[in-house]
Amino acid sequence: MLIEHLNRRLREHEAQALRRHRRTAESPCAPHQRVSGREMLSFCSNDYLGLANHPALIEALAEGARRHGAGSGASHLISGHSCAHVLLEDALARWLSPCIPEARALTFCTGYMANLALLTALGDASATIFADKLNHASLVDGALLAKAPLQRYPHGRLDLLANQLRLCSTPVKLIVTDAVFSMDGDLADLPALLTMAEAHDAWLVIDDAHGFGVLGRHGSGSLSHFGLRSERLIYMGTLGKAAGLGGAFVAAHPIVIDWLVQSARSYIYTTAAPPAIAHAVLASLQLIAGDEGDARRARLAQSIGMLRDGLTTWVQEHRSLGWRLADSATAIQPLIVGDNAAALALAAGLDAQGLWVPAIRPPTVPAGTARLRITLSAAHTPQDVQTLVDGLARAARALR
Ligand code: PMP
């Protein structure tokens, strides 16, 4: 019965062009990558600074393993909390302290788990969660798991959020938003959200998965990008994107961090990440904040400008297709095609040319907004970007 049921659902997925397929990377994460037996030029990864295969981080990982062993052996509250985790948490707290006074930090195995932790631990029955409708799935899942009622506001509609806040009577109010929206690449209006949080005695929970390491002074993230400072900020950053490794952290008021350690189930009931990763993240933070990080961010900005110039012209010349380049200044550059099958066909046309760009479809994005999600990295060369612009034009011609 179960197998028949699942088979039927799988066939439905296939019929709606929603079936997902995994490919196997056979070389390290990089723009030029061997994938399922083919050499591809990739525009898929979140390795925004091109650090995932950096020799200094590979060496730091090996050195971390030599020093601390391969695994942590237990959860943080049993015996898995290592001095490497402590050093990393101290460094991350210092990193965020210009924006969050007295910040402390807590590391997690993944951003998904950090978001579940935050929303379930803070969103108890005395709270209400207010969330942008385009927030990442991990924030949505955290809010659904939390005891607090969830109120979602349409993307960026802070006027509607203000009404919801005015009508709310719970003592704790949590406004929750992506800083850089992961499927659109646009930035939340964090200054306005913080002003609103202050006016309504609410707290602002920010998921900066795509801003940490890329935006702000020396890559310190979206809070720095907007020049924000407040103890009402609760910040989640991930370490598997610009930082090139894996894991995540929350930085916030010390009492918030204390409470997460006491009560967040996705922190307490899981094996601590290998300390070698924490050791290597420390090396990554040094790269991100140094001259090399600045140079990499400059190269990334150049590629973003070049891609947008190329695609904006092309989309204007082919207006009849009804495609749209999202209004994004970040490394996430979606080309919104609309129809699921058209997005898949376009991705297939690129694939045939050795260009790897994922077609993102519902439920990840709203129905009717299927898209190519192009992501850029500091490791892309201008030639790589030009190859993509030319390849897209060719794939679109073939489609018509
Ligand atoms: N938040 C956002 C906005 C993300 O894009 C992602 C990952 N795609 C996550 C959280 C989850 O982070 P992780 O991959 O470390 O679980």
Image (cartoon, rainbow, N blue to C red):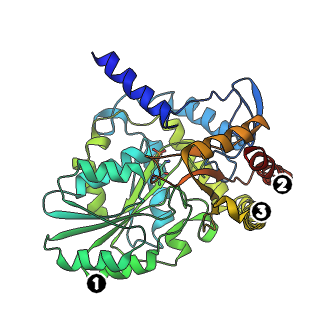
Tell us which disc is closer to us: 3 or 1: 3
Q: Are marks 1 and 2 in contact (CB under 8 Å)?
A: no
Where, by quadrant of the figure, is residue 348 drawn?
Answer: top right
Name above or below for residue 1 compared with residue 121: above
Q: Is residue 238 visible?
A: yes
Name above or below for residue 23 compared with residue 84: above
Spatial CA span between label 3 and label 2: 12 Å
Q: Is residue 197 visible?
A: no
Label number found at residue 314: 3
* Image quadrant in which the N terminus is located: top left
Indicate the amino acid at tag 3.
Trp
Spatial CA span between label 3 and label 1: 44 Å
- Residue drawn at x 79%, y 63% is 310
Question: Does label 1 or label 2 sit earlier along the sequence?
Answer: 1
Indicate the amino acid at tag 2.
Gln
Q: Are marks 3 and 2 in contact (CB under 8 Å)?
A: no
Q: Circle 3: is it few (<14), some (14-19), or many (20+) Cα within 10 Å?
A: some
Residue 384 percent coordinates (x, y): 82, 49
SS label for mark 3: helix
SS label for mark 1: helix
Q: Mark 1 — residue?
A: 199
- Residue drawn at x 25%, y 80% is 200
Give the camera-side residue of 205 and 149: 149
Indicate the amino acid at tag 1.
Ala
